Image: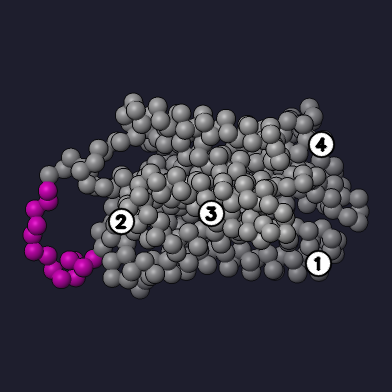
């Protein structure tokens, strides 16, 4: 995620560099290339999308004893909003970043294992700060007399975001294998990455549950390996010599990407209509199954659609990110996306908890006039608290300075 730098490929039209003798220390120093702005934009869009989607879900009630937590998107046509769920974009950006590192000079002198360990150390700092802060917060809230049920309910929900990092660690570790698969089989590798979780999902619903109950959870890794591999492929093609600098800008490529996105969305619609899949792309209270736990065929199709769309609109996204406002937003999220991801639910919990338990207010009914009218106020409160948390805990996302 944010801890992965995504260097851009060298300019393909530049003449061969003149080789001059350099001091030994300089000769062995790894070259740093500028970041690929597209990867930063995709990561920023994915991060903002996750935050907004979670903030739209806020639905809770407190009767003085029990905290009841629902999901505002589970009412009416709220499931349509879940089709904007952007997790595939985060895995695509992570794969592109890892692909650039694998194909560049980041592994010089330490191998890929060293790169993975360095990334783990970088992630461990903000995650460790998050866990320690929540442990202290739970102890403090209980000591202050906040009802146990409310405290432990929030404490169980906050760490659920860490599943993403677990999947990312495994995919990061096998990046050399995935890049080798792309270099050897090209589009066949991407096709297999999409077909494998689809086949596993077909077995899940085609065989008895006692046979496939555990097997289905392999899709927690396999389903997200598809957009991750797409990111690796993007980085490999952008950095490959003797290839067009903008292979995605051709009319044929754009038509293929548009057709791929339309076909994937159509497949999602058919799968949801025929079943047994629920219409929501996330887990909803009352649904017999969740499309995310473990990921199902509609989620795989959803990932294909999102990857095709961001590649289709790559040039427009990069142009927008090049504006003064775009550079500020994308730059800030590039530095702090891990902190934002870890703490955005906590910000929402803090605001809702104060309103329910502290002020004795009730949240407006989802999708009613009051709910719509109050969204800007609630979102502003969530954002204000989140900015404070980022200011306090963002320092743990910075890389330690070496003396």
Q: Nearer the viewer, mark 4 or mark 2?
A: 2
Q: Nearer the viewer, mark 2 or mark 1?
A: 2
Closer to the chain start, of discs 3 and 4, is: 3
Report the front residue among 216 and 74: 216
Q: Which residues are magenta?
A: 16-29
**Taken as a whole, is the magenta stretch helix, strand or loop?**
loop
Image x and y of residue 220, in percent: 59, 55
Q: Tell me, for residue 382, which label it has, or none.
A: none
What residue does disc 4 label? Answer: 364
**Callout 3: SS:** helix
**Callout 2: SS:** helix
**Callout 4: SS:** loop
What residue does disc 1 label? Answer: 142
What residue does disc 3 label? Answer: 222
Q: Is residue 257 left or right of residue 266?
A: left
Q: Nearer the viewer, mark 3 or mark 4?
A: 3
What residue does disc 2 label? Answer: 103
Image x and y of residue 148, in percent: 84, 63
Q: Residues within 10 Å of mark 1 (few under 14, many from 20)?
A: some
Q: Which of the 4 image quadrants contains residue 156?
A: bottom right
Closer to the chain start, of discs 1 and 4, is: 1
Residue depicted at x 61% and y 40%: 298
Closer to the chain start, of discs 4 and 2, is: 2
Residue sitting farthest toward the front: 207
């Amino acid at each position: 995620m944010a801890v992965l730098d995504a260097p851009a490929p060298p300019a393909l039209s530049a003449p061969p560099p003149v080789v001059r003798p350099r001091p030994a220390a300089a000769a062995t120093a790894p070259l740093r290339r500028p970041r690929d702005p597209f990867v930063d934009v995709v990561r920023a869009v994915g991060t903002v999308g996750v935050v907004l989607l979670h903030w739209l879900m806020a639905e809770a009630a407190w009767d003085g004893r029990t905290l009841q937590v629902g999901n505002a998107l589970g009412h009416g046509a709220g499931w349509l909003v879940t089709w904007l769920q952007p997790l595939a974009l985060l895995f695509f950006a992570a794969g592109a970043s890892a692909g650039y590192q694998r194909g560049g000079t980041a592994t010089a002198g330490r191998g890929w294992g060293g790169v993975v360990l360095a990334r783990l150390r970088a992630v461990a700092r903000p995650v460790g700060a998050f866990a320690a802060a929540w442990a202290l917060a739970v102890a403090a809230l209980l000591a202050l007399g906040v009802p146990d049920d409310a405290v432990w309910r929030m404490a169980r929900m906050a760490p659920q975001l860490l599943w993403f990092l677990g999947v990312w660690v495994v995919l990061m570790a096998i990046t050399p294998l995935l890049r080798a698969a792309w270099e050897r089989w090209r589009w066949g590798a991407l096709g297999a990455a999409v077909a494998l979780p689809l086949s596993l999902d077909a077995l899940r619903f085609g065989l008895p549950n006692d046979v496939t109950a555990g097997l289905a959870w392999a899709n927690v890794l396999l389903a997200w390996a598809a957009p991750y591999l797409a990111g690796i492929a993007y980085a490999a093609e952008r950095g490959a010599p003797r290839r067009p600098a903008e292979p995605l800008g051709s009319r044929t490529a754009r038509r293929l990407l548009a057709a791929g996105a339309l076909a994937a969305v159509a497949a999602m619609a058919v799968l949801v209509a025929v079943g047994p899949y629920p219409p929501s792309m996330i887990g909803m209270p009352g649904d017999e199954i969740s499309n995310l736990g473990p990921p199902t065929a509609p989620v795989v199709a959803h990932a294909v659609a999102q990857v095709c769309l961001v590649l289709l609109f790559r040039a427009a996204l990069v142009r927008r990110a090049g504006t003064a406002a775009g550079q500020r937003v994308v730059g800030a999220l590039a530095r702090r996306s891990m902190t934002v991801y870890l703490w955005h639910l906590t910000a929402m919990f803090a605001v809702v908890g104060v309103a329910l338990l502290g002020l004795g207010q009730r949240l407006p009914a989802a999708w009613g006039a009051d709910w719509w009218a109050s969204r800007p106020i609630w979102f502003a409160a969530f954002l204000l608290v989140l900015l404070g948390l980022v200011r306090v805990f963002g320092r743990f996302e910075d890389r330690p300075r070496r003396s």
